[in-house]
Amino acid sequence: MSTSSVNQRNGTHRSSLRAHSSASTSAAAHKPSLKSKTVLRKSSPAALGSGSSAAAGSKSGNGGDAGVPGRVRVAVRLRPRNGEEMIADADFADCVELQPEVKRLKLRKNNWDTDTFEFDEVLTEYASQKRVYEVVAKPVVEGVLDGYNGTIMAYGQTGTGKTYTLGQLGEEDVADRGIMVRAMEDILAQVSLETDSISVSYLQLYMETVQDLLDPANDNIAIVEDPKSGDVSLPGATLVEIRDQHSFLELLQLGEAHRFAANTKLNTESSRSHAILMVHVRRSLKTESNGNSHMTKSLKPPVVRKGKLVVVDLAGSERISKSGSEGHTLEEAKSINLSLSALGKCINALAENSSHVPFRDSKLTRLLRDSFGGTARTSLVITIGPSPRHRGETTSTIMFGQRAMKVENMVKLKEEFDYKSLSKRLEVQLDSLIEENERQQKAFVDEIERITVEAHNQISEAEKRYANALEEEKLRYQNDYVESIKKLEENWSKNQKKLAAERLALGEKNGLDITSNGNRSIAPALEEVSELKRMVQKEAQLKMAAEEEVNRLKLQLTESKKVEVSGNSEIMRLHKMLETETQQKEKLEEEIATLHTQLLQLSLTADETRQNLERHGSQKTSGGALDSFMSQLKLPQIQDPGNAEKPPVAKLFEQVGLQKILSLLEAEDADVRIHAVKVVANLAAEEANQQQIVEAGGLTSLLMLLRNTEDETIHRVAAGAIANLAMNETNQELIMDQGGIDLLSSTAANAQDPQTLRMVAGAIANLCGNDKLQTKLRSEGGIAALLGMVRCGHPDVLAQVARGIANFAKCESRASTQGTKRGKSLLIEDGALSWIVQNAKTETTAIKRHIELALCHLAQHEGNAKEMVKEGAIWELVRISRECSREDIRSLAHRTLTSSPTFLTELRRLRVDIR
């Protein structure tokens, strides 16, 4: 091989190999491998990609609860000769011969004898990076996208191309991209960043310590195992969300820069640690519509699939005689070989179905517990070199792969319901429905008012219109009738006068002719009379028509009155509804007034009791007054059972209801808020009421009072109620999640009243007793707030501060004995030790007892011993072991002094006898 070929650790194959295609990869049926040309090594192995059917079968099951068998898939990859081997081994043939068509490898023992081995895939020195990814890693990546755990691991002698195969970035030539880069490209192409998420951790196992390659300061990460499922996790590792390929490449470059490497005879850049890349893929499944109602769909929780891809670049095994390691490099090589040896023992035990698999012999095997014999789909690529000088290492690598092929995993689907997302969606829908209901109610009330006004206006207009029309018609017909009668009377009188004149003239002229011509003179008069009769009849008909029109108008007026009556009834119904609403409002106002009065009475009782407590300084008197007050609140009067009265708070609780009491915490009247928070504090003192208060939103309301009000009385009573609720471990986590420690610290910083500081210190002291919250409590300023309250100097406040420090130190001591806590105490880092030592000899019994306990717990961790000696705490421990009034504390102090090498050394130097 020419010198232009470049070592695979640094990034490329030789350029002349890129033009060659890989050997035929047809899926020919595998035949048994031969030992000395005839003996079988492994029977009927399947192709690397055959796990897809298992994945499909598991997906059709019950969400991954039932596993599907899946054997570990093993591929072998041959590195081409490097420049040194082309010169040193020029006269010798390669120690291996590859037969990729039948997926076999022949290992030459000598010129006439070979061993034949069969693998799932055989990759020659001409195989491209793309070809390696497709046959080794792609099926595993596809399984991770479907919700399964997957592992891709490289094993082999140092300098055989493991890091090139897995971690090559391809910055100079994209064709050289390794499995890590190509896997992330496929994952990003398949997921939707709007609904799915990808997060990455990059670690190294160096000298049996797990270190964070993305945060070098995090150099001792604990491995946590779930006692129920056996799953292994690293909660202390940095987890970075990935949105694009560029940011992923930057993370790989950052991690590679922090990884340990050394120059040996076998490899100029030999990895001295095992690199572990963890990719967490969370995908939301789209639920198919089946015709159900919208409400049924909204109540169905979304399904989430969580897959984890683990890519492991193992450090190369090496023989010290060949690598030339010495000094610290020799110690690194020993650690690498021990962890690889432990991995080989586990695989041997799994291959032989042993009842005991020694996973706990090494941190490497603990981390890979799910990959071998667990629930992950695992693909292993073993890398070998062609040089006959390293035939022993090549044989060991091949045998490791052969044993790994016998390991069976039970692949399981990681699928679960996303109840948190469902809860958020339902809350949004509920808020939307409440708003829509309020809008509809407002629109309904407005519509009723509008209809009522329109009905009144229409009725008034109709009444006016019909009255005016009726009056006008009546007047018109009356006028016409009178005028017609007058005309008839005038015509009749005129005719009568005319007729009489004619008769008189005729009689005077010719009395004789009157008789003969009388009939002829009367005839025109009779005709005129008949005409007048017809006119009278016509007027009578007109009068009848007018009367009919009047009757019709009367009917219309009657109908209008009926419409008016119906409108009045609707108006009356609306008035009744308004009266009902008014009555309910008045009733509610009466209840609020009654509640206000009861709250005022309780507040006065509580204030009187507090004043009694402040006047009587001794604990005995204080305890008696407190017991008297609590007996008034809690114990019914022992009288006639039928007439026994309940305590005021309990009676108020039953009569008014918790929800109404909590609603008064948001009242505009400051006195109402003060009385309401005092009642809630008294209720919170009863353990039976605490869950109801939290579920009804009482804890949130109390924290809102600390945030939004400046009244110190409200701060004092609210802090006392929170302290009572903080006695419960579940409530402690809720208080921390809702920013309670920050609000309590802010309240302590602004408070001047010793009783307010005592309540705040008591709440923080209760939170200090939770092992899970220590780091968060300290990071959010809880310890600093406790130490800041000592400025008050009041004995009650100092007692609560000492109790909180003792609780915190006890949790740290417990964590240290369990092996999960290392380094100096957080209390010492925050400067609490000097205050503890200064107040260790106080005369106040409560403060002294808590400080003695805190000193004993801090001294149990050897990492604190030097600081305690420096601050003079060792003298207080000696005093406690001799003079403490409590036997258990004396015994604990004595045991701590005698078990610490640092303390014993200092005591001998000071010539102090503690026997």
Image: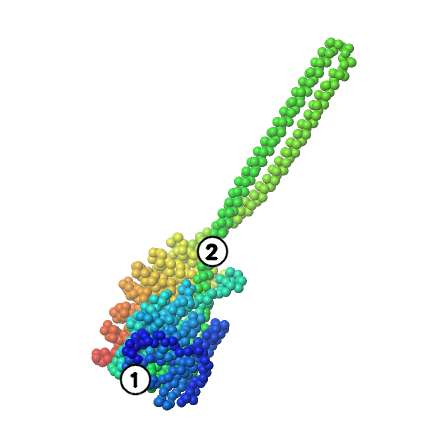
Q: Earlier in the sequence, mark 2 or mark 1?
A: 1
Q: Amino acid at mark 1?
A: Ala
Q: How is the image coloured?
A: rainbow
Residue name at image x 56 percent, y 36 percent: 464
The x and y percentages for residue 869 are 24, 75
Rendered view: 444 above or below 28: above
- Residue at (45% x, 80% y) in the render: 28
Query: Which kind of residue does numbered mark 2 sit on?
Result: Ile
Q: Is residue 395 left or right of residue 504?
A: left
Residue wearing tag 2: 434
Element type where label 1 sits in the image: loop
Tell me where residue 486 appears, x and y as whole percent. Answer: 64, 23
Nearest to viewer (mark 2 / mark 1): 1
Whether residue 846 is visible, yes or no, is no
> Residue 368's quadrant in the figure?
bottom left
Look at mark 1 in the image and give the residue it sits on. Answer: 90
Q: What is the x, y in percent for residue 888? A: 33, 76
Q: Which SS class for mark 2?
A: helix
Q: Is residue 532 visible?
A: yes
192 and 793: which is toward the camera: 192
Q: State the residue lying farthest toward the top.
A: 509
Give residue 878's quadrant in the image: bottom left
Q: With 410 as the anchor, is 894 left or right in this view?
A: left
Please tell me how crowded label 1 is: few (under 14), some (14-19), or many (20+) other residues with Cα within 10 Å: few
Residue placed at 46% from the left, 54% from the top? 435
Q: Horizontal placement of 289 versus 809: left or right? A: right
Q: Quadrant of the N terminus?
A: bottom left
